[in-house]
Amino acid sequence: MNVNRAAGARRPNIIFLIADDHRYDGIGAYGNPVVRTPVLDRLAAQGALLESVYIMGGQSAAVCVPSRASLMTGGNVFRTTAASSTAETENRRLWELNPALPTFPQLFRERGYHTFATGKWHNGKESFARSFADGASIFFGGMGDHVGLPVQPYDPHGEFPDSDAKPSEAFSSELFADAAVDFIGTYREEEPYLLYVAFTAPHDPRTPPPEYAALYAPDEIPLPDNYMARHPFDNGELAIRDEELAPLPRTPEAIRRHLADYYGMISHMDAQIGRILQALRDSGREEDTLIVYTADHGLALGQHGLLGKQNLYEHSIHIPLVIAGPGVPQGVTVGGLGCQMDIFPTLCELAGIDCPETVEGRSLAPLIAGQAEAVRPDVFAVYKDMQRMVSDGRWKLIRYYGSDGKGAAGRQLFDLETDPWEMNNLLAWDGYADRLSQMERRLLEWQRQVGDPLLVRAEAQALAVRGDGGAAL
C-alpha cells in the first residue's frame, strides 16, 4: 500500500486507543453476541477490522509490560526492554524500554507531530519522557482501583516524581476520556497530533459503574465452550495472582460473575471512547484523523480452567485491532496473520513516515488495502521460560517447559480451523507426526533467529555435557 502525499500536504492526526486485558472476542464486531460495544462496532464499520493479530508474550508475569514494549518499539520481546533475559520475575529492568530503540510516538514527535498521552504507562518514565511532548492524568504503573488511581500531570522536565501523583476522583475510563476530550477541544496548533489514550479497563478490579454493571445479569451470561473447572495439567504458572481471583475448582457461577463484570467494564469504556470520538467530530477534524483501537493482550476468564493471561491460548494472545480514517477502506474485514509489533510500521505507512531500521514488524497496510493476502507466514509467542508457541493461522503448537509433562509430553497441537476453542490436542491421536515435526522445526528456527534465551541456555548446556566447548558460551 503506497501512501502518496502532495508536497506540503498535512499528515493525518492519530488517535491511538489501547485497552488493558481486552481480548479479541470481547467486541460485538468480532462476533460476540453478548457484550455491548456500539461505539467500537461503528468504528469497525467505518474502517478495517483485523481478524488475526497476536501479541508475542514476554518474560514477565505482567504481560502488559513486554506487550506494550513490542507495540511501542516494533521489536521482538527479547530486545525491546532494558534487560534482554532474566529468570528473576521481579527484575524491574524488564519493565523499562531499551533506550536504543525509538518508540513510535517518539518517531512521530521527531517528524513534527505534537504527541499527547493520558492513562497507563508501564514501561518506565524515561521512555515516556522521550515519547510525549504533553499529557495529563498519567498513571505510571500496572493496575489499581479505578477510582483513586494515582495519576499525575505532565512534567516538562521528564522526571515525573512519585510525589506528584494524586488519587483520582473520577473512574479511570472517564478520567482518561476527559483528558482526551479536553485536548481535542483545545488543540489549535498547525502541526498534526498523536493522541495516545491508554485505558486501565477492563483490567481487574472489575468494578463497572452501577448502570453498566446492571447491563449484564450473571445468570444470563453463557459459559465459553472451553469452560473447565481446572486446567488439565500444570502449565508452569497455575499459582499466580491472576489465577487466584476465583477459587478452584472454577464454578459456572463464579465465571459468569467474572464475565458479567468484564463486559460491564468494556461497555463503560466503549461509552467513554464514544465521548472522545464525538469530540473529534465536533472539532471538525474527523476526516483527517486516523483512529486505532487495540489492546495489550487478552484474558482467560474461565476458558481452559484459567483466569489470567499467563498462557499462550487464543484467549490470551489474540487481540483486537481496528483502524479507521484516511487511507483505510470502510467496512472491511482483514484476514492474514499480524503481530502486535506490526502496528508501528503500519502507522508509519499510513502517515507517510519512513520507518526506522530498528523496527522488525511488517506493515499491515497491504493487507488492509487488499493488495496482499499475507505479510507473514506465522506468528510466535513466549511466556517466561515456561511456554513457547508457533501458529500459521490454522495449525498451532504450544510447548511447555518445566510442567508435569502431561498433555502429550508438554506439547499441544491444535487445528484452529476445526477447533477454535483449542479443546482437542491432536497429539493424542495418530497421524500428526509430520505436522508436529514441521511446527517444531519452524519454532526452533525462530528461537535461533531472535536469540531466545531459553534455547541459548539449552544449547550451551548440551555443548557442555558433550564437552566440546560449551563452557565458553
Image (cartoon, helix red, strand yellow):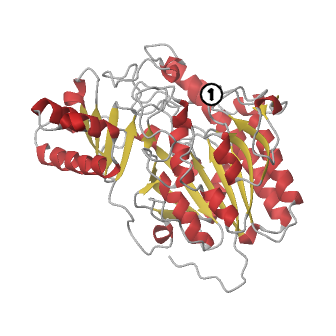
In the picture as drawn, the residue positioned furthest to the bottom comes out as 7
Question: Is residue 403 toward the left or the right of residue 202 in the image?
Answer: left
Q: Position of residue 197 (x, y in %)?
A: 70, 48
Which residue is identified by label 1?
204
From the viewer's perspective, is 336 left or right of 464? Answer: right
Left or right: where 320 falls relative to 177 = left
Between 32 and 150, the one lying in front of the other is 150
State the SS at label 1. Answer: loop
Which residue is drawn at the image coordinates 72% and 36% (left, top)?
139
Nearest the eye: 198 or 191: 191
Badge 1 density bin: few <14, some 14–19, many ≥20, Cα 10 Å: some
> Residue 306 occupies which quadrant of the picture?
top left
In front of the other: 442 or 279:
442
Q: Is residue 192 visible to the viewer in this orientation of the structure?
A: yes
Q: Where is residue 267 in the image (x, y as percent from the top left)?
A: 68, 40
Q: Tell me where residue 296 sits by quadrant.
A: top right
**Compared to 76, does 236 lie above or below?**
above
Quarter of the figure that contains the C terminus:
top left
Kind of residue at badge 1: Asp
